[in-house]
Amino acid sequence: MFQEALEQSSLSQLSTTIASISQAIATSNLTLPEIAPVTWPTEILSPRLALIEDTVKNVAAWENLRETAVREVVDRSQMAKAGDTVAVAGQFVLDHALLVRSLPPSIPSNLSMGNHAEIRHRDEEVGAKLEEQLAVLDSRLLHLRKRSWENMAKGDAASTRLAAAGIRELLTEVLHLLAPDSKVEKSDIWLQRSNRALPKPTRRMRLEYVIGPLAREFDAFVPFDESVEHVNKFTHQFADNREVVRIILAEVENWIYLLVSARRRDV
C-alpha cells in the first residue's frame, strides 16, 4: 500500500495527513448519498444531484490515484511528489463534500471542530504553496489570487461575489496559460479529434494537453475537473453565502495546485 510505503520512509507526517484525510472522507463523502435525500426536499435535491454524485466519483478517483501511485512510484524523490499529489487530491475531494453539505439548508457534518480546523489549515497550506507556483508562472496570476481573498476578507455580499468570480477567473487563466489554443491546436489531441466541427479546444482537451493522457493523474483529474464545473454552476446562486464561497475558493485552489504541480515538464 502507498500508505505503508510512506510510513516506511521519512515521510511519516505526509502519511499521517493522508490517513486523516481518508478518515474524514469516509465520514463526509460516502454518507452524503443517503443523507441528502432525507434532508433536502425534492425541489432542492434535484438540481444538486450531480454535486452529490461527484462526492462519490471523486472518492473513487482518489482511491485509484493512490493505487496507481503504489505501482508507479519507485524512489523516494518520486514518493514525496506523489504523496503531495495524493494528499492535496484528497483535500480537494473532502472540500467538495463539505461544500455540498454547506449548501442551504446545510447538512450537519459528523466531523469535530478539531477536524474542521485541521482541514482549514491544510487548505491554507495549499494556498501558500499555490502562491509560490503562481509567482513562477505569471505574477499577474498571483495578484488575481490575492485579490480574490482580499475581497473574501471584506465579508459583505458584493465582495464575496467578487471573490467567487475572481477564483473562477484564476482557474481559467491558468488553464489557458498552460494550454493555449495555439499549442493545443498543433498537438495530436486537436489534430486527431473526432468532432471536426469544434471551433476551439475543449476544456477536456486542455486538461489532456497539460497533464498528458498517460500520466497517472489523468484518470483521476477528469472527474475532479467535472466536479469543479458543476460547482461553478452554483457559484452565482450562493455567492452571498460567505462560508459556501470560502469552501469554493479552497476547493478550486486545490484543483489549480494539482494542475500546476502535475503538468508535463514541457508545458
Image: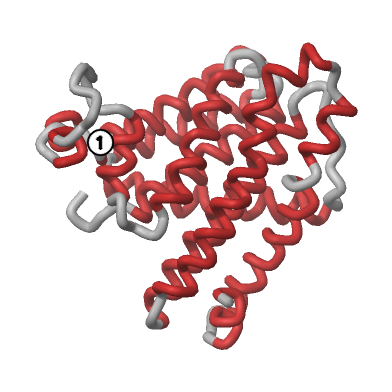
- Is 213 drawn above or below residue 149 in the view shown? below
Location of mark 1 (residue)? 177
Please provide percent x and percent y for residue 266: 18, 54
Q: Is residue 123 visible?
A: no
The quadrant in which residue 159 appears is top right
**In this view of the protein, which residue sits in the foreground, 230 or 68?**
68
- Is 260 drawn above or below residue 18 in the view shown? above
Tell me what residue is drawn at x 68 percent, y 59 percent.
21
Query: What crowding class fits label 1: few (fewer than 14 Cα within 10 Å), some (14-19), or many (20 or more)?
Result: some
- Is 264 drawn above or below residue 8 in the view shown? above
The amino acid type of the residue labelled 1 equals Leu
Tell me what residue is drawn at x 46 percent, y 25 percent.
166
Q: Is residue 260 left or right of residue 128?
A: left
Q: Is residue 165 visible?
A: yes
The quadrant in which residue 188 appears is top left
Tell me what residue is drawn at x 52 percent, y 52 percent.
126
Position of the N terminus by quadrant: bottom right
The quadrant in which residue 49 appears is top right
Please provide percent x and percent y for residue 230: 55, 26
Please provide percent x and percent y for residue 77: 38, 77
**In this view of the protein, which residue sits in the foreground, 157 or 199?**
199
